[in-house]
Image: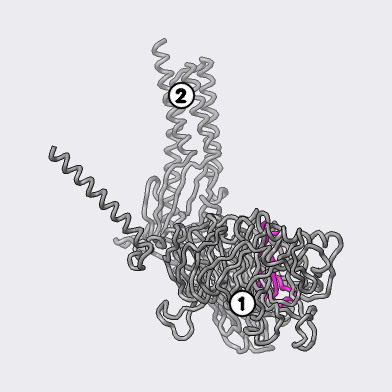
Amino acid sequence: MKKASLLMMLGALLLLGLFQFPLWNIMLGAPQYPEPLGINIFINGLEGQSEFDLQNIDGLNHYIGMKTLPKPEDMWEFSVFPLVIGGMALLGFLLGVFGLLGKIGARWFLGWLILMTVLGVLGMYDFNAWMIDYGTNLDPNAIMKLQNPDGTPMSYKPPLLGHKQLLNFDAYSYPRLGGYLMGFGMVLTFFAYLVGRKKEYQN
Amino acid sequence: MQFKNFNRLAFLGVFSLLLFSGCGNQGSKEGANGALNSSAAEKVYVAPGEKDDYYAFLSGGYSGNLTVYGLPSGRMFKEIPVFSQFPTSGYGYSEETKPLLNTSHGFIPWDDLHHPDISQTNGELDGRWVFVNGNNTPRIARVSLATFETEEIIEIPNSAGNHSSSFITENTEYVVAGTRFSVPVPQRDMPINEYKGNFKGALTFIGVEPEHGHMEIKFQVIMPGFNYDLSHPGRGKSHGWFFFSTYNTEEASSLLEVNASQNDKDFIAAINWKKIEEYIANGGGKMVPAEYAHNVYDESTHMATSTMIDEVLTVDPTEIPGAVYLLPTPKSPHGCDVDPSGQYIIGSGKLSADITVHSFDKMIAAIENEKFDGDAYGIPILNFEEVLAGTVKSGGLGPLHTEFDSDGNAYTTFFISSEVVKWKLGSWEVVDRKPTFYSVGHLMIPGGNSRKPFGNYLVAMNKITKDRYLPTGPEMEHSAQIYDISGEKMELIYDFPTHGEPHYAAGCPAELLAPKSRKIYRLDENKHPYAAIGPEGAKVERNGKEVHVYMSTIRSHFTPDNIEGIKVGDKVYFHITNLEQDFDVPHGFSMIGQNTSEILVMPGQTKTTVWEPKKPGVWPFYCTDFCSALHQEMQGYVRVSPAGSKVELKWSVGE
């Protein structure tokens, strides 16, 4: 159980990377923006890829009537997400410690991973819901009111993952270092479960 | 077996083809232009989206501006206003920049910009600033190479025709300004024909503060009344000396083309400025009354201030033993150029066929051994033979100016024979010559006036254009040619028109400047007293007949864009702050009936333009720079009521 517990502890601690590195990133390139504008999404707020990117994205978005990008105080997520991530990291670490002390079995690691996955899916769902609202809930007095060929109002929702063309902009949405560390950490906790379970069977 | 032989034959065939094409290439380099065209085109072709290798700063001469080009493409990137009003940006029209053009003669909207020189550290280009001279009303300007804007202009007292300027010492300790005309010093009412012996030539040493580049006149050397034409610093072993070419040592005041061309030799004056520094440190020199303007632009307030200074320190060279010597140089030398090692001082006698090269080592030896041929007004004249390193028997006529590559070659322009001649330092043999189109003045090799030249390209700046381009009536732009000088022989690769009259240029590798070129001015560093930082800072204030409009701009509206309560007879100051913090998003402002130019406001900047409405009515203003898809909507109105009307001052946006 020692190896499994150490893996569990390490995997859980990797979540803490989210306090330092962005979870996700959206880049917006256009002919007029050969150096694309970018948003780094942290668990506690948004930052521009370059210093003035958020301001410049807001400046462009006002033409199509999008709301300004949220400040940390504008969204409950930015205060709750750090607590959830911090809590899950602590919980996972403690489970590892208990595992090391032989107090609990490997299924607890799997339990943590399932909980973390559920929370992650909820987080992604919430993120997507925000993007839908951001991309479709537009000012009725917007300067440019564009429609799809079928007559419905055009949505400017950025993609959850991958590339999408938004008018003159190419939007690219991918995880960043914090997100990759979290994912890698979760994989480690799954290995912790597998290694622990194998050990338990052997015993 | 047969197959093998066939292979061998094929191999031989290819080999001989290579051999022939090799010969062909070499032949064509010597030969006619036609065969060269395709490879020349490749050499100057900078594909769409690609960047040039070098920046070139060409003086604009009588345009008063400095133009920025790329090499090898010859594409112009920017015209930097320096000594002339520039309605394109509002330079010299905006309230913030008007003080830059202030002088002891009042506001002067124009000058004749001649010689750019890029700042140096240890004799190598450092890309901090470029210094330029105003020839007509003597001034030196400093242009920032981060913003590519004029930041400072200092007037030179006791000078007239500020031509042997604005050359810098190898650590930018000084920027040096020498007078072309000698004049009474101090200026006074006297008969012109009493010139000889009474007029003086001031050589001015302006200290450059290393951090911000601020200029201050440290001293003026009051020389005999010759005409000081061009100058260059010593470098390396000759660091501490400065060399000035002279003409009119005859001291004629009329019909100079004849009367100043009588002496077989004029001089190159060698000034030991370190010795003069010592002399001043020991209390030497004389502070004399003077009147000159010092104008400084502050990037944080976006505003220039002009200060008048009332005295200047002068030194009499005859009172400082060992400070000044005269090197006889044939036939009214123009260029006075120092090679990268600092050993050779090249004097281009412009009425001569030959180029005269002086040796710094021989000069020092001649001074030590007192090899003098008399003196001029107490300044020792060194024996010509004792200082002469060699003579380049060029076969051309009218040498003007020389620059250098890094392989011990010199390149001299010949105005009269219209050509560039490449020759070897030390052996003085001519290696190559190529025609220019036509009558070349100066040439430029990036870094060619420093310890470290970049010997890829040479730009020849011509005085006469004639038939080079499609005709445009009697007045045409001047022509310039680019030569590839990376090989033994020079190769003409491009020909392009320049703006104004380039008298000189300075170039440097692109990577020295491009990474530090500013994209925006930071709004959070904007200390302009009338800035509207954010739309909430917008307001209109009346102070008697003066009205100050604090106006902000962002794509694509002005705040405020409706103003009422302005009256005929008011003086309305529009202080426009551009709130954008995005690269290359300027906004402009222009008001109908305004007796001045528009202003172009860069992101984060504040600029002010004045309007004095003369008629009641509702008068529009608009943004002059196509800033966005809704640029055309970026407009507003000012209501002007008759003088004495009771209409209340109010302003709004979006109501």
The relative height of residue A102 versus residue B75 in the rendered view (above or below) is above
Most common secondary structure along the magenta stretch: loop
User: Which of the pair B321/B512 is nearer the observer?
Assistant: B321
User: Which of the pair A119/B552 is nearer the observer?
Assistant: B552
- Residue B476 is left or right of residue B529, and the answer is left
- Who's the residue at 55% across and 57% down the image? B453
The relative height of residue B213 versus residue A172 in the rendered view (above or below) is below
Chain containing the residue with disc 1: B
Q: Residue B429's mark?
A: none
How is the model colour-coded? Answer: one colour
Q: Quadrant of residue B299?
A: bottom right
Q: Which residue is disc 1 drawn over?
A: B112
Instruction: Locate the C terminus of chain A by quadrant.
Output: top left
Query: Do the CB atoms of the residues marked 2 and 1 lie less than 8 Å apart?
Result: no
Front of the two marks 2 and 1: 1
- Who's the residue at 51% across and 33% down the image? A15
Q: Secondary structure at mark 1?
A: loop
Which residue is the extreme one toward the left? Answer: B2
Q: Amino acid at mark 1?
A: Asp
Mark 1 closeness class: few <14, some 14–19, many ≥20 residues within 10 Å:
many
Which residue is the extreme one toward the right? Answer: B283
- Residue B655 visible here: no
| Bounds of the magenta segment | B154-179
Q: Amino acid at mark 2?
A: Phe
**Measured from the top left, where is residue A18 in percent x and y?**
52, 38
**Measured from the top left, where is residue B523 in percent x and y?**
61, 61
Q: Residue A109's mark?
A: 2
**Measured from the top left, where is residue B116 in percent x and y?**
60, 67
- Residue A114 is left or right of residue B622, and the answer is left
Chain containing the residue with disc 2: A
Mark 2 vs mark 1, CA separation in Å: 80 Å
Q: Quadrant of residue B578?
A: bottom right
